[in-house]
Amino acid sequence: MEYDRILSDLLNRDEYLVVGKKTVRLDALDKLLGKARFTSDYIPKNTMTVKVVRSTMPHALIKRVDTSTALMVPGVVTILTAKDVPGENEIGYALPEQPFLNDKKVHYVGDPIALVCAIDETTAQEAMEAVVVEYEPLPAVFDIDAALAEGAPIIHKENNVAVKTKIRKGDIAKGWKDSDVVVEDTYWSPYQEHMCLEPEAAYAVPDGVGKVTIIACMQSPHLVREKVARVLGWKLNQVRVIQALTGGAFGKKDDTGPLISGYAALAAIKTGKPAAYIMDRSEVLSVTPKRFPVRFKYRSGADGKGKLTAVEVEITLEVGAYANRAPFWLWRQTAHACGPYEVPNVAVDGRAVYTNKVYGGSYRGFGNLALHFAAEQQVDKLAYELDMDPVDFRMKNILRIGSRTTCDQLLDNSVGIDKCLAGVAAASDWAKHREPVRIGTKIRGWGVGCAYHGNSTSRSTPDWSAASLMIHGDGSLTYRTAICEIGQGSPFGHAKIVAEIIGCNLDSIKIEQPDTDSTPDSKPTHGSRGLMMGGTAAADAAIKLRERIIRVASNMLDCPEAHVELRDSQAYNRKKPSVKIPFAEIVEEMHIRGENPASYGFYTSPRRFFDVDTGLGYNYAVYTFAASVAEVEVDTETGQVEVTKIWPAMDVGKVIDPLMVDGQIHGAISQGIGFAIMENLQLKDGVVTTTGFKDYIIPSALDTPEIDDTIVVEEPYKHAAFGAKGVGEPSIISIVPAVVNAIHHATGLRFSTIPITPDRMHKALKEAGKK
């Protein structure tokens, strides 16, 4: 295959042009100077405002919606309810159980019922308060055990279980028989709010000829187009979606993008006026998806030599009012249940359970952050039971080439977790820190955490990506991908791949914002697939264009194609490098010779599968591996936990840009610390009572610990451009267990619930007599 030959040649270069080198991002200066445009920057003054009338009941039948008084408020344009939805009144992601606007029943406080369209926000707010909704209350359930109890109120259809999963590997009874030590515990991982800097916003403009243009913050323009078109009852080509630069997403805007865009689009179409829907912080906190809460019941066994023999897990995922991404989230937890270790005998049962609370959704780490919080504590406990060093115990069981994962997938390439673990152990002087150190009222301890995360989509669903590339008459290039820029820089990574393959100057590439009218469907920006999948599609487009450039350049240089070198946006004969032809001249000749200056790239991942009866199979294209050591100090008088240093390592396949890797890891450390010891979303009777930054504490720059140089392991993935794998999600997964295990090392206390806030720590220390 020509693609493989060219890529092999590129991989065997003595030195890369831009790949693997630190490079200032093309969009960095505009963002720094405030010139970058986010959704709200596109909305003109006096644009019609859209507000959502939401349920005040957690579970009830809707008997009547009276908008007559609200419509009399001066400045109200219209009020839309379910009867005004021209297409399907359905917006659910995985299961068809989530109405776009509720007209029969509400399932949590915050369910959308009507859209108020008014001349300004003040008027819209007044009209919202004038809408009368008459309910017939139904019994509500606010926790998973109540939802599963006999006779519990049914939230959807016949029972409160949305979906089930399972894995059966080996012989679990034999595994317990072979175990010399067994540890059991139950763990709870709560909601976590994303707290994106930019709240959700969407702007829709009708064009009057059966088309609407939407500008919004999101993670998947083509998914937004699909969902909005379905609600409107339109064809896909009637809905144009443009992703504005997005100020943080972390998974949330993959879920909210279709909703907010649908509200703005329906309002625009029904009124014939441009419409804007902008959420405020309290609304985001109250009604939008969070990290799914989940309970794990773990039982883990090992023999006397320190080899894992069996793992049994019961996973109960609380989905809230709607399943949303739950089938994929739960499956990822099920498939990774043993952590990055080889275990011969495994039994996992998972179920996703409805409650009358705000529903869960995508969040960085997608199931694996909570899973590894539990699984890595189990591994630590076994090591202590066997009187083995936690690092040594992990090394005995870690996945390697030839190992089989929880779901029995054979790993035949790109496995570097052993190097990650060895690296952080050496960098942190792990062997010298095996006893906690007391410093006045504080105790210092060290902990380790390992992680792995399957790249690409869950449940073995087919996955592909696409990109387009065009070279212009002056030698500049336009690159298009629907992989979204949400702060992580994946499209810039694509541009580096293109520049490396074509030999153009990096600043000659213009990355266009995703636009469904001109951008290929690259599928969503999630699942750690943005660089691995999207970047490989970019490479495919670049290789096709490179072939044409070289074909024309070889004729112009009068040399064999094999002698043509492309660098600095020029072509030359490597045997006679003195004569260089600029890309501009080559492009002109391409047009004359009928060579296409545009290229379409497409990449599909290897087909995956799993057995529905056992859960075993080839579940993910490839895995990213990570390990971290954390140093913490616990103040025994106040209960305050401070993370003082982190030593991170990651097997990234191939580094496209070290600054991007460091940026992802440093951000993940802060976010992981927040989840472990700070962030605490409060609910009462199913209602979120947390309102903003004042009562939802996230780490500041002052809470950022010292971070040692990232240990980068490069075990290339054989089916990706330059071997690169996803970094954004895996970077957070090992942080939480490392911090929690370090707290145990310092205090001797185990915490099966997070966050480990000062009051929780203070109480535990007091009860243990350690103050």
Image (cartoon, rainbow, N blue to C red):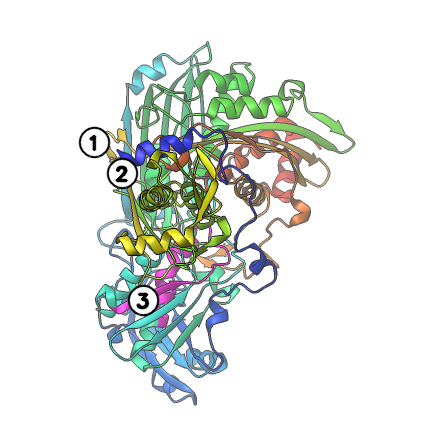
Q: Is residue 495 magenta?
A: no
Q: Is residue 244 magenta?
A: yes
Residue 313 % position (x, y): 37, 30
The residues bearing labels 2 and 3 have C-alpha atoms spaced at a distance of 30 Å
The residues bearing labels 2 and 1 have C-alpha atoms spaced at a distance of 15 Å
For the residue marked with disc 2, what is the amino acid?
Ser
Camera-nearest residue between 128 and 22: 22
Identity of the residue drawn at 35% across and 13% down = 177
The magenta segment: 238-264
For the residue marked with disc 1, what is the amino acid?
Asp
Residue 750 % position (x, y): 56, 30
* Residue 613, disc: 1
Which residue was labeled with disc 2?
A: 460
- Horizontally, residue 436 falls left or right of residue 38, namely right
Which residue was labeled with disc 3?
A: 240
- Horizontally, residue 752 falls left or right of residue 274, namely right
- Residue at the extreme right of the image, as rendered: 440
